[in-house]
Image (cartoon, rainbow, N blue to C red):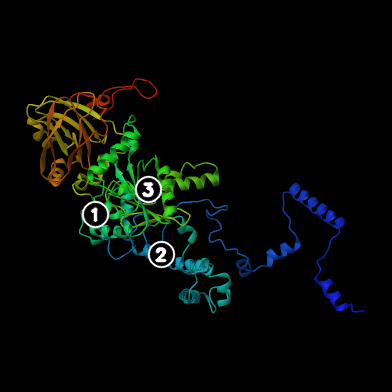
């Protein structure tokens, strides 16, 4: 016969093992019985071969199977991973303002005491090793990285940190052993947030040395030229721009450089502090007003493809989610990052803090089922936000997932803004933090209203009485008086009855400098709606209502901008009519949302 036995043997060896149906059924029954016992006993058992593999497998074998070692097994990176926003920091940069840490000069940004600076230097070495280890696990390993890896790994004994080069390649450098040798407690350090001396003063006391305040110092790192140089490259690449403006200081917060920064990129203009407007303000009306004002100011980039106007509150989060969704959608289409730009103190850092805090709340909710009562203060000041202009000094990066980054940028000072002349304590009074309660005075010729000691609004000539509705912070004291005695009154009561400025009043008035006057003519539109707003840059605005022609004189510190514009809230004058009792002005009482009569709310 031509039949070959060796071929039969080979064919038999290659044939798969066939298990009879009876054995399959018995095996399945055993597995079901074992699973039932595990459920009853609250345990889990596995096949002996799999159990042996789990005990004996090496890290290199796990890597070959696609597993990666978790850097922080007790951290927040539970699976399945959800999209999260995370502040991107490094050991040698202040996460709150973006300045590089240094220990040479307390009068410069980024200062740390020597003992804290030394710790950050050591942490930076640990970070370098962690980054190299991440590269070793990826496809981005280069010859230069290999050399750096060998240099770093020589510190742990004859062959590296744990048994020689082969062990280093297979298991990576033991970061904990490295940190321990340096005298670092990584767990304890992870609970602390190290920020520079300047940010510490701003976050905890609201104060900063004049040498470290943009606009008040000659320090090159804090100059407007340095900030503009940082922003220039944004327009040279695809980017989505979120431009923050302050509704209560619109002309003082729209960047003259916005078109140059954005170029052809889409601009989403976020009108901040919408929550502080009186509740009857219509959102559509406000957005249309913003568009008209931008057109009048010559801002063209808002018309770029993808551009939009949104009313938001960076503090409460009103409108923020929808705005970010639009920005991220545009960034996905363009395959680019998002940049937040705006004038100093417009609310950029407050927006970043709100985003990070909300993300932290979501993680806590997943972990504990509800928000912990103490959590609100735990995330305080991830990025420094302060009434003082210019708290952010360099780009601050936030990872928003899907390969996208969100950048907080330094704020630019808009010329002619009153806030540049005020102290930190005075700024807290001038910048609105609660819903503004507009207040209206009837002002006749020869009379005026003092806006603290910072501005004076009066009717001049033969003008008939007009109504002036003040939209300024509730902390500013308004005082109607006669023009003849106002100069004497300011000199006597500035810093006391008239605030801001704060005491010592006469000294602060001298520091603020001499006043200059502007006279404008306003044609009234009748008693049912305001004819125009008079905007006081950095302070707020005054709506003017009446019949006929009004000649209005506005006195402000020299250099502070004053402008006349269409009214933002033309129909709110009668909701805010006040009576004056000699020592204070009191808003007319009205009904609350519940329908109950409420008492007049005044300003002492």
Image coordinates of residue 592 in percent, x first then y, are: 36, 24
* Above/below status of 190 relative to 562: below
Q: Secondary structure at mark 3?
A: loop
* Above/below status of 492 relative to 224: above
Point out the frontmost of discs 3 and 2: 3
Instruction: Determine the residue located farthest toward the right in the rendered image.
Output: 1
Check the picture and name the quadrant holding the C terminus.
top left
Label 1: few (<14), some or many (≥20) within 10 Å? many
Earlier residue among tags 1 and 3: 1
Alpha carbon distance from label 3 to label 2: 46 Å
Image coordinates of residue 96 in percent, x first then y, are: 36, 54
Q: Is residue 47 visible?
A: yes
Q: Which residue is mark 1?
A: 214
* Above/below status of 287 relative to 242: above
Earlier residue among tags 2 and 1: 2
Image coordinates of residue 25 in percent, x first then y, are: 84, 54
Q: Which residue is mark 2?
A: 119
Point out the frontmost of discs 2 and 1: 1
Image coordinates of residue 226 in percent, x first then y, are: 25, 60
Residue at x-position 27% and y-position 55%:
260
Point out the frontmost of discs 1 and 3: 3
Q: Secondary structure at mark 1?
A: loop
Answer whether labels 2 and 1 touch (C-beta < 8 Å).
no
* Above/below status of 488 relative to 135: above
Q: Is residue 199 left or right of residue 81?
A: left
Q: Which residue is mark 3?
A: 306
| Residue 277: quadrant of the picture | top left
């Amino acid at each position: 016969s031509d039949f070959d036995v060796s071929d039969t043997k080979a064919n038999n060896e290659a044939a798969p093992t066939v298990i009879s149906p009876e054995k399959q059924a018995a095996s399945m029954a055993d597995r079901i019985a074992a699973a039932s016992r595990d459920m009853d006993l609250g345990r889990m058992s596995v096949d002996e071969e799999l159990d042996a593999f789990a005990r004996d497998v090496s890290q290199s074998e796990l890597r070959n199977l696609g597993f990666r070692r978790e850097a922080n097994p007790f951290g927040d990176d539970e699976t399945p991973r959800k999209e999260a926003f995370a502040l991107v920091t490094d050991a040698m940069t202040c996460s709150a303002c973006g300045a590089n840490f240094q220990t040479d000069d307390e009068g410069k940004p980024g200062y740390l005491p020597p003992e804290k600076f030394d710790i950050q230097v050591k942490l930076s070495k640990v970070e370098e090793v962690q980054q190299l280890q991440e590269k070793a696990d990826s496809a981005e390993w280069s010859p230069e990285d290999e050399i750096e890896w060998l240099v770093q790994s020589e510190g742990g004994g004859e062959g590296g940190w744990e048994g020689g080069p082969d062990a280093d390649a297979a298991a990576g450098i033991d970061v904990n052993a490295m940190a321990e040798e340096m005298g670092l407690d990584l767990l304890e350090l992870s609970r602390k947030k190290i920020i520079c001396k300047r940010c510490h003063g701003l976050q905890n006391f609201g104060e900063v040395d004049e040498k470290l305040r943009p606009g008040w110092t000659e320090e090159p790192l804090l100059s407007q030229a340095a900030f503009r140089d940082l922003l220039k490259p944004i327009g040279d690449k695809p980017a989505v721009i979120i431009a923050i403006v302050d509704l209560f200081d619109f002309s003082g917060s729209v960047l003259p450089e916005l078109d140059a920064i954005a170029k052809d990129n889409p601009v989403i203009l976020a009108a901040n502090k919408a929550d502080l407007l009186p509740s009857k303000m219509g959102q559509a009306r406000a957005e249309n007003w913003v568009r008209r004002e931008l057109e009048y100011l010559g801002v063209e980039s808002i018309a770029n493809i993808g551009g939009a106007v949104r009313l938001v509150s960076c503090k409460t989060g009103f409108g923020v989610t929808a705005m970010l969704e639009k920005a991220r959608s545009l960034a996905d289409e363009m395959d680019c990052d998002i940049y937040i730009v705006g004038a100093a103190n417009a609310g950029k850092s407050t927006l970043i803090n709100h985003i990070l805090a909300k993300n932290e709340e979501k993680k806590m909710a997943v972990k504990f089922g509800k928000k912990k009562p103490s959590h609100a203060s735990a995330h305080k000041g991830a990025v420094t936000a302060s009434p003082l202009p210019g708290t952010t000094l360099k780009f601050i990066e936030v990872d928003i997932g899907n390969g996208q980054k969100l950048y907080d940028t330094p704020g630019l000072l808009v010329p002619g803004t009153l806030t540049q002349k005020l102290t930190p304590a005075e700024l807290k009074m001038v910048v609105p933090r609660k819903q503004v309660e507009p207040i209206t005075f009837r002002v006749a010729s020869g009379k005026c209203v003092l806006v603290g000691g910072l501005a004076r609004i009066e009717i001049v000539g033969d003008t008939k009485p007009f109504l002036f509705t003040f939209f300024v912070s509730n902390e500013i004291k308004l005082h109607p008086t006669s023009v003849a005695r106002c100069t004497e009154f300011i000199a006597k009561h500035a810093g006391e009855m008239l605030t801001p400025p704060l005491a010592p009043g006469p000294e602060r008035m001298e520091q603020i400098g001499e006043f200059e006057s502007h006279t404008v003519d306003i044609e009234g539109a009748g008693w049912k709606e305001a004819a125009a707003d008079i905007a006081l840059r950095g302070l707020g605005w005054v709506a003017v209502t009446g019949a006929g022609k009004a000649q209005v004189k506005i006195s402000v510190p020299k250099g502070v901008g004053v402008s006349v514009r269409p009214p933002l809230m033309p129909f709110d004058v009668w909701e805010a009519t006040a009576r004056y009792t000699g020592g204070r002005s009191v808003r007319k009482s009205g009904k609350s949302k519940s329908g109950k009569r409420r008492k007049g709310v005044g300003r002492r």
